[in-house]
Image (tube, grey):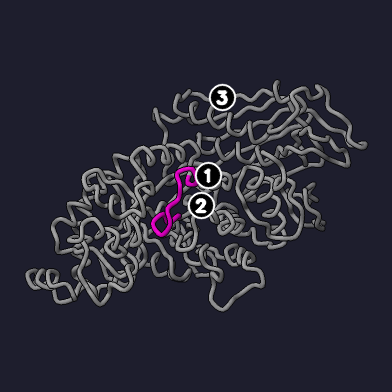
Amino acid sequence: MVESRRIISPFKTNTDNVDTFKVFPLPDQYSTGSIVGIIPDWKNFNIAFQQNPESPGDFDIISDAFERYGGMIFYNQAVDSSATCPTLNGTKVYCMNRAVLTILKGSTDLIPKPFLGMDESYAITVNPSDGFIQMTANTVWGGLRALESISQLIVPTDNMNGVDFGKVYYSFAEYLPILIKDQPRFSWRGFLVDTSRHYYSVKKILQIIDSLAYLKMNVFHWHIVDAQSFPLVVDAYPNLSGKGAYQKKAVYSAEDILAITEYGRRRGVRVIPEIDIPGHAGSWGFGYPEITANCPSYKHNINNIPLNIAEPKTYQVLGAIIKQLVQNGFSDQYYHFGGDELVMGCWLQDPSILSFMKQKGFTQPVQLLHYFEDNLRTLYKPYNKTMICWEELALEYGYNLPKDTIVHVWKERHTLIDVVKMGYQTLLSGGWYLDQQIPNHNQTFYEWVDTWINFYQNDPTEGFGMTDSQKKLVLGGEGAMWSEQVDDANFDSRVFPRTLAIAERLWSSSSVTDLTSARIRMEYSRCNVLVRRGVNAGPVMPGYCQATYDNF
């Protein structure tokens, strides 16, 4: 049974009779008590990893995670802390001295990689009577989620119950004993970042992946190229980035991509590339004009320019790009090939394409699209990749997509029901566009950040009348940051704290809907999880966040 509790937090608000459990997103099942625990001597705190059978690949991931989370839990803590637990203004405090993470099913892969449908469930028991923290997960991916939850439960602080520790930080755990049994509601909990409209540094992308892991999100959807710029280095066609990137330094090399995909792997975050085609291809033509359509009356808007699907070189270039993506470390089964906002009228102004239509006996431009998609399939299938596409290919263009295609809904939430009725698996991004101040029609807020409420109430399966079998086709969803007006400098303030609402909607039960509870817990987590770890996340309510002013 979940107890209602008051939170000891760095901001003041009335939390009586409101669920304010510190783990975010809210776990599936949990119970708490009223005891306080402290880790008085971080040097001698014993955290161990158990697994049978042992997996060297899992051990590598968990060892790295232990070191990473240890720095988060014990930062700035006194080296010579007292070996005994104090009494704080009459409150009995229990010493916590050891933790064990047990993985029940070791990976058979030497280099384990996150994948769609991976088991991220875990359980935690924190027993103050014996000072023991027990974490259990079936897989290494659940183990990572357990460590994230523990890192949120054990909070470094310089004051508690009226006792000021000065410049010394102690690590506390409240509401003991704690029992957690947790698993995600959706297996696909992603975030799209557009690196074409503005270039993002590799350092920033790595920080974004960290932020996703903090929120138990598991997909970094990398919209790597678009009409405005082509920052992906393709060895076989160097002019794509040589003339298509904003500048020579604003590119992603093979080494950059390997570093990013490996960084995500170690955090249980899948890195999935998107090459948005055949539309949005203007930047391809900067280096190779012959592979984009020539339509003078459409050139006033670079977003209008599609690929020249009649030019054989187009498919040679596209094949080289897919090969480069595979070689660079994009190992996930799923690749996103766009398919949205195609301006077919441009094709009808290009003499070479009109001649091609006549040669093929095509009478409608949509037949050109079908021809292109058929050829695209022959390019990615040899690498055992499965396509993700935007909704237009399924709902507007009449293309017979392979049944294993994932259809990505971005226009309206209710479109999901049309997709699942066709039998396709689907993802939701409609209603989760973080570049928009007003994500839903005809609804505004005095403060733009309060649109987190829209995001929180944007449920992928509820309110449609979906059958249980149709709900199973909804894999989850993604927040999306289109970057026309966003880059490294203002990314955090645009994305956070609103992404917390998306993260909880995709992880927690559909019954978790209380906005008062969500607001309080979001504010606590944005301060003590995100800001304390270096993410410049803004507040959702008045208060004071000490982490904003600490020197890390």
Q: Is residue 544 visible?
A: yes
Q: Quadrant of the C terminus?
A: top right
Whichever of labels 1 and 2 marks the residue nearer the N terminus, that label is 1
Residue 128 colored in magenta in the image: no
Residue drawn at (83%, 23%) of the image:
84
Q: Amino acid at mark 3?
A: Gln
Q: What is the x, y in percent for residue 20?
A: 73, 52
Which residue, given by chain and number where applicable, does mark 1 sit on? 207
Q: Nearer the viewer, mark 1 or mark 3?
A: 1
Q: What is the x, y in percent for residue 119?
A: 49, 41
The crowd level at tag 1 (other Cα within 10 Å; few <14, some 14-19, many 20+) is some
Seen in the picture, residue 45 relative to 90 is either above or below; the reply is above
Which residue, given by chain and number where applicable, does mark 2 sit on? 488
Seen in the picture, residue 339 relative to 526 is either above or below; the reply is below
Residue drawn at (42%, 43%) of the image:
115
Q: Secondary structure at mark 3?
A: strand
Which residue, given by chain and number where applicable, does mark 3 sit on? 50
